[in-house]
Image (cartoon, helix red, strand yellow):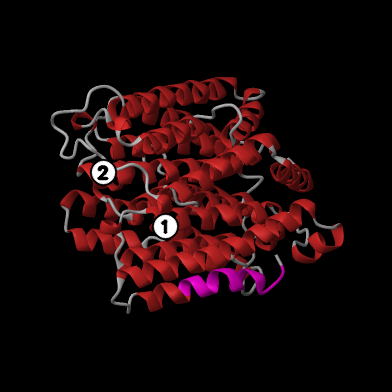
């Protein structure tokens, strides 16, 4: 993207996130967050429409081709990066939307945009580290021992390897004569990292796995999903930062070194997908269950990213984007139920469809979209991903499909336990208020985006061609 456009998107968000902490009114902070995110969403959507339907001259001027994954995918990723935080802060229950929560949502959106549009490795690492600040602050406020341990594990496994890998890559780049902004593609083309790719690349992939929540670096995900009720919890779990680090660092720095890591990464990805799906099946806490569904889905995304097959890589990125939407929507409905009933224990819930049919319908639709129901964006993206894997890795592709089916069983059972049957006598509030207008707006927008991505995937097909061209330019 041309110089200055990226900073014009993420710069105001980061500035506003800091200034909002000085506000005293949670309502004013929320309105400001919604307004800022809506403006940035409109701007990023305009860029996507320009890429999909604009003239070749306009597209080349705004998105000059550099044979980069990030350049070919940026326009479609940007609206998703902003849309998730906007939907979360717009529809979150008032009881959990404090000044800090609004600031954190804006900060996380700004960090995601910055990581997507950053010009070099140092800025990428800075945005990734800054995105962990809201969870660290939340853990300090809560003073919950389990949450603090999970946060410490999150920072240790995702932040430390990332910093070490970026410092090593930058140091090797300096020795080869490169200066700021230490562009990953230029460093890779110089060959300076070739003798050291196995350990520098390993550090970066460890950071990616931890940030995605892939087994065995996943333990922080269910803990955060269970104990953090505010927007910070869901936005941190479904954050795109892990995929963006893989996109802008791992795949650009070590495209030729990934095949050597495939014997390690692919089995871990398949194991994570199956492990998360099986554990989600046995959960009674709805938030913790969604955490394990995310662990399973992250394994699927990792499998596609490390395959270097054009269809699998593009499918993995698009799958991750679609899951950001569908899982965000599921968490919105779950938080609405929890705020009304004071519990996320599915053993204490039931029969809520009688008084909250809108919440029930939204939860069911988004649950189906999460497990790649036909006609949704996840169906299109998972089809690409699995097709790319089945040719060379049929066993892994089969495991991913089975795991998706198990996740479907888990989410349908969750819908049944929360919304169908008799009203539980243990429920704190048997008569639950139905979906509110602001919640309905966010839910409908997410569902429509998933349907448009599945039924009219013209922009997604353009992105697929962009990734294919990138892989062809880089060679095997």
Q: Which residues are the magenta region?
A: 2-14
Residue 310 shown left or right of residue 412 in the figure: right
Picture quarter with the C terminus: top right
Q: Residue at 32% across / 34% down in the picture?
A: 289
Nearer to us in this view, 296 or 416: 416
The reply to whether dot 2 and dot 1 touch (C-beta < 8 Å) is no
Residue 231 shown left or right of residue 322 in the figure: left
Disc 2 versus disc 1: distance between alpha carbons?
A: 17 Å
Residue 57 shown left or right of residue 408 in the figure: right
What residue sits right under mark 2 in the picture? 338
Q: Extreme left residue here?
A: 426
Q: Is residue 94 magenta?
A: no
Label 2 environment density (alpha carbons within 10 Å; few <14, some 14–19, many ≥20)? some
Expressed as whole percent of the image width and height from the top left, the position of residue 341 reads 21, 42
Q: Residue at 59% across / 72% down in the picture?
A: 7
What residue sits right under mark 1 in the picture? 90
């Amino acid at each position: 993207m041309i110089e200055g456009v990226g900073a014009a998107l993420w710069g105001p968000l980061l500035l506003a996130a800091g200034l909002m902490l000085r506000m005293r009114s949670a309502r004013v902070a929320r309105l400001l967050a919604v307004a800022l995110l809506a403006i940035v969403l409109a701007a990023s959507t305009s860029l996507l429409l320009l890429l999909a339907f604009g003239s070749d001259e306009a597209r080349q001027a705004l998105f000059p081709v550099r044979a980069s994954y990030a350049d070919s995918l940026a326009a479609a990723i940007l609206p998703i990066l902003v849309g998730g935080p906007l939907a979360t802060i717009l529809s979150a229950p008032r009881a959990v939307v404090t000044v800090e929560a609004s600031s954190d949502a804006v900060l996380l959106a700004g960090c995601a945009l910055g990581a997507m549009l950053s010009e070099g490795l140092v800025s990428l690492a800075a945005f990734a580290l800054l995105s962990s600040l809201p969870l660290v602050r939340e853990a300090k406020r809560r003073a919950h021992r389990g949450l603090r341990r999970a946060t410490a594990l999150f920072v240790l496994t995702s932040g430390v390897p990332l910093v070490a890998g970026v410092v090593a890559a930058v140091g090797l780049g300096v020795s080869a004569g490169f200066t700021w902004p230490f562009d990953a593609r230029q460093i890779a083309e110089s060959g300076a990292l070739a003798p050291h790719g196995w350990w520098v690349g390993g550090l970066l992939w460890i950071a990616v796995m931890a940030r995605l929540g892939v087994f065995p670096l996943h333990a922080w995900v269910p803990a955060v999903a269970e104990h953090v009720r505010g927007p910070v919890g869901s936005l941190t779990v479904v954050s795109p930062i892990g995929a963006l680090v893989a996109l802008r660092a791992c795949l650009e720095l070590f495209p030729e070194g990934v095949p050597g890591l495939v014997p390690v990464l692919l089995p871990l990805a398949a194991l994570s997908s199956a492990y998360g799906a099986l554990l989600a099946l046995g959960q009674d806490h709805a938030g913790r269950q969604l955490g394990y569904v995310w662990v399973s889905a992250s394994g699927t995304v990792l499998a596609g990213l490390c395959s270097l097959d054009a269809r699998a890589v593009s499918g993995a990125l698009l799958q991750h984007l679609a899951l950001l939407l569908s899982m965000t929507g599921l968490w919105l409905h779950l938080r609405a139920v929890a705020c009304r009933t004071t519990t996320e224990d599915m053993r204490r819930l039931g029969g809520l469809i009688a008084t909250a049919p809108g919440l029930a319908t939204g939860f069911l639709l988004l649950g189906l979209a999460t497990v790649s129901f036909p006609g949704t964006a996840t169906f299109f993206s998972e089809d690409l991903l699995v097709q790319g894997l089945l040719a060379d890795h049929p066993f892994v592709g089969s495991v991913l499909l089975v795991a998706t089916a198990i996740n479907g069983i888990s989410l349908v059972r969750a819908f049944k336990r929360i919304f169908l049957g008799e009203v539980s006598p243990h429920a704190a509030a048997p008569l639950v208020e139905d979906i509110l207008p602001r919640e309905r707006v966010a839910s409908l927008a997410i569902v429509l985006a998933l349907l448009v991505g599945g039924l009219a995937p013209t922009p997604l097909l353009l992105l697929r061609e962009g990734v294919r061209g990138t892989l062809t330019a880089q060679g095997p």
